[in-house]
Image (cartoon, rainbow, N blue to C red):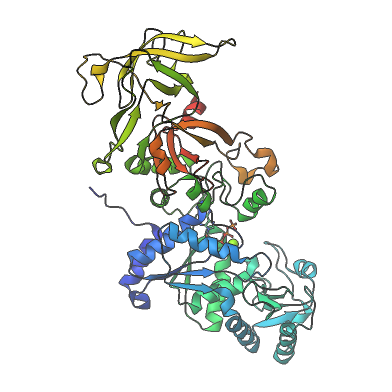
Amino acid sequence: MSEEKSLNFIEEIIEKDIENNVHNGWVQTRFPPEPNGYLHIGHSKSICLNFGLAKKYYGKCNLRFDDTNPEKEEVEYVESIKEDIQWLGFQWDNEFYASDYFDKLYDFAVTLIKKGLAYVEDASSEEMAKLKGTPTAPGSDSPCRSRNVEENLDLFTRMKNGEYADGTRVLRAKIDMAHDNMIMRDPVIYRIKHTEHHRTGNAWCIYPMYDFAHGQSDSIEEITHSICTLEFIPHRDLYNWCIEKLEIFPSRQYEFARLNMSYTLMSKRKLLTLVNEKFVEGWDDPRMPTISGFRRRGYTPESIREFCDKIGVAKRDNMIDTSLLDFCLRDHLNQIALRRMAVLDPIKLVITNYPAHITEEFLEAENNPEDIEAGYRSLPFGNELWIERTDFMEDAPKKYFRLGPGLQVRLKSAYIVECHDFKKDEAGQITEVHCRYFPESKSGHDTSGIKVKGTIHWVSCAHAKDAEIRLYDRLFTVENPAASEEELKDILNPDSLHIIPNAKIEPALLNASRTDKFQFLRLGYFCLDKNSVVDKLIFNRTVGLKDSWAKENKQ
Ligand code: ATP
Ligand code: MG
């Protein structure tokens, strides 16, 4: 049953435009990342929206690298961004770079100068700031404002030719020093930067400001609906002014609320600090809120897309609980994950009445009860099994439906056992649990008539393999790390990574591949880590089976 979903406000705008035959009903969007870091979960919201709208309305979506700032951009980031978008399940129609437009943008600037709508400013940024006024008081004209066209053209050409040092001159749009919107008070549109660019090398020593590059790039690509986040609302006046004065394709800007998530940071700059200061292993550390981090941790693109769909498109800033993403994730993993068994903190269970002549027994175990087609696997059983230490108690309380002297449980996909003895070491630690099994209680063929309340997981000692298992907790201790006054290192959760070096896993896991998703029974969802090798298997816990955090915090 599919639910009829109401349109979000951007879809409403688009449908109206289509109805009115604006741009002949054509829809062209773009996703415009600055290649100065890896994409984070917030970007996936923008990706789903831009690519999703293009798809829904039979339009196109470009990937445009907003690479007008030569200092912070790197090829590594470009590559990672492309990989992440494709992993999320989207394909761009064109790959563009704002830096490819440097010639055109320069010509646009010259056009403005010729129209008497731009001038070269000699004042320093401090001096300019002084003349800018305040939101309640108008600014005042700089002496350079009255320069004539010839002089401006000459100076701008010399800026381009590298005759001036960084910061000594800028090009400003000549708009209105008393405008209500401070951004419209003769904004800087070009600055001098003698810095090499990752694509254009040393061809340029002047670079356009964001506001002069973004809208014009949209226009060049004939973007019909340019979607951005709310902080760009004050920039819309300038966006429209440039388009109007340059008489270029009338792209329109629409703003939606950026995704904010509890216990998560979404600033590339701060995420870069975590990487540089080695608080995490890298951009794709499974604790990072980056798309590559989520991928390595075992999140699925389907669950992230579902999450973005569920949160919708808001016009006002809000904070989304991380548990919503995990809800979408569990929902998807439950459908696709192969069920396997692993024991994190093993103690030995010995079946004392297991026939001595049986050296090996193979049981049939379901791969996924949610998916019949996933079939069955062969699961080795024997007289010695690993079980979790927490599944045995010497003095079990009443409602403990696991093992203890005299208690019975079912071993998942195997037999019912009853504990009759156990062994301890000198320190009082349990070392062995001794049980009898009921041969006629075999799963799927149970004729024993015995009813038990608990089922536990296990791994046959003779067949178990060792693996390292990494359990994760949230990276930050505060709900809104972005707003925290404290330094990043002081709000990091010291227990965000817990490594179990020698867990016992069932042999079917030896064939695991990087794309497989597993549910380790009763422990959560897991995947192979990228650093896992045949001799040393490493599994990441993607997410637990239940939202244990929410429960703990309610108490
Ligand atoms: P950051 O501050 O993390 O660097 P940014 O906005 O500068 O983020 P860009 O690379 O410029 O990052 O972003 C590309 C696109 O993704 C932009 O259209 C931006 O509005 C959008 N975007 C960035 N962060 C979010 C977010 N948290 N929620 C929704 N969209 C976002
Ligand atoms: Mg940005």
Q: Is residue 208 visible from the viewing direction of this image?
A: yes
Residue closest to the eye, 388 or 141: 388
Q: Is residue 21 left or right of residue 36?
A: left
Q: Residue at x 73, y 85 (%)?
A: 161
Pick the front one: 554 or 359: 359
Give the image quarter of residue 102. bottom right
Q: How many marks?
A: 0
100 to the left or right of 195: left
Q: Is residue 398 above or below residue 204?
A: above
Which of the 4 quarters of the picture holds residue 22?
A: bottom left
> Residue 307's spot in the image, x, y percent?
41, 48
Give residue 10's quadrant in the image. Answer: bottom left
Q: Where's residue 9, x and y in %?
A: 39, 59
Q: Residue furthest front?
A: 357
Q: Position of residue 541 (x, y in %)?
A: 48, 38
Residue at 40 percent of width and 14 percent of height:
403
Q: Tell me the residue at 40%/46% (across/down).
A: 516
Residue in the image at 36% along x and 71% along y: 59
Query: Which residue is more in the foreground, 318 or 268?
Result: 268
Estimate the x, y position of residue 529 in percent, counting from the top left.
Answer: 50, 45
Q: Is residue 35 visible?
A: no
Q: Is residue 162 above or below residue 375?
A: below
Image-quarter location of ligand 2: bottom right
